Amino acid sequence: MVLFALQITAELDNLTDLQPQGGCDDPEFTYLFKLKCQSCGELTQKETAVSLSEAIPLPVGKGTTNLLQKCKFCDREGSVTMIPGRGRPLTQMLSEAGKFAPLMVFECRGYEPVDYVFGGGWKVQSLAGTTFDNVDLSEEEFAEYDEKGECPVMISKPSSTFVVVK
C-alpha cells in the first residue's frame, strides 16, 4: 500500500482558494487520471474516474474502496481508496511562490496514479470576496471580470503532480 497525494498549482490573478466546488472533500467531485499498473507497468489508455461517492466492497476482507479495476494487460487487480481530510485550497500566496497545494490523498494497491486531468466543478474566490462557482479548467484557463473588485480575474497554467506521502 502506497499513499499518493495529488498536488495542484496554477497562476492565480486576483484570485485565491482554488478547490473543488464542495471543498477539498467534496463527495461529488470526480478526479480523472491515468493509472499505471505496478505489476507490469502498463498505463491505462483512458482516464479513470474516482470520487468519494463511489464505495465498492473489497472482494477480500472488510471495508470498501473507491475504485476496483483489473489491468487489461496482466489481469492483476488493483484498488484506489481516497483518504479525505488532508487537502487544502490553492491560495494566492502558494500560487505566487510557485508551490503546490495538496488536494486529495489516494491509497493505491497495485496501481500508481499519473497524469491528472483538470475538468469542471471548481470554485475560486476573488481577492474582493466574489465567489466563482462551477469553474471549468478543462481548457487550462479561466477568465472573468470581478464587478465587486472592479478587476479582471484569471486562472492559467494549472498543473499537478502526485507525490508519495506517509
Image: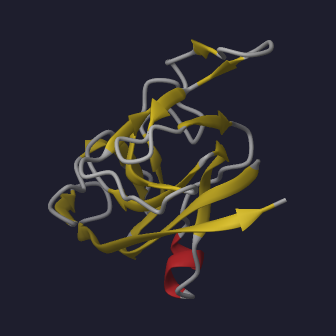
Residue in the image at 45% along x and 38% along y: 75
Instruction: Choose between 65 and 111: the one closer to the eye.
Output: 111
Could you tell me residue 69's position as x and y percent?
Answer: 46, 31
Could you tell me residue 7's position as x and y percent?
Answer: 56, 64
Residue in the image at 51% along x and 73% along y: 92
Residue in the image at 35% along x and 41% along y: 72
Instruction: Choose between 21 and 152: the one closer to the eye.
Output: 21
Residue 30 visible? The answer is no
Q: In the displayed structure, does residue 40 sit left or right of residue 134?
A: right
Residue in the image at 39% along x and 72% along y: 159
Instruction: Choose between 149 and 17: the one closer to the eye.
Output: 17
Instruction: Choose between 23 and 165: the one closer to the eye.
Output: 165
- Residue farthest toward the front in the current orientation of the protein: 74
Q: Quadrant of the C terminus?
A: bottom right
Asked if residue 5 is positioned above or below residue 98 in the image, the reply reads: above
Asked if residue 33 is positioned above or below residue 7 in the image, the reply reads: above
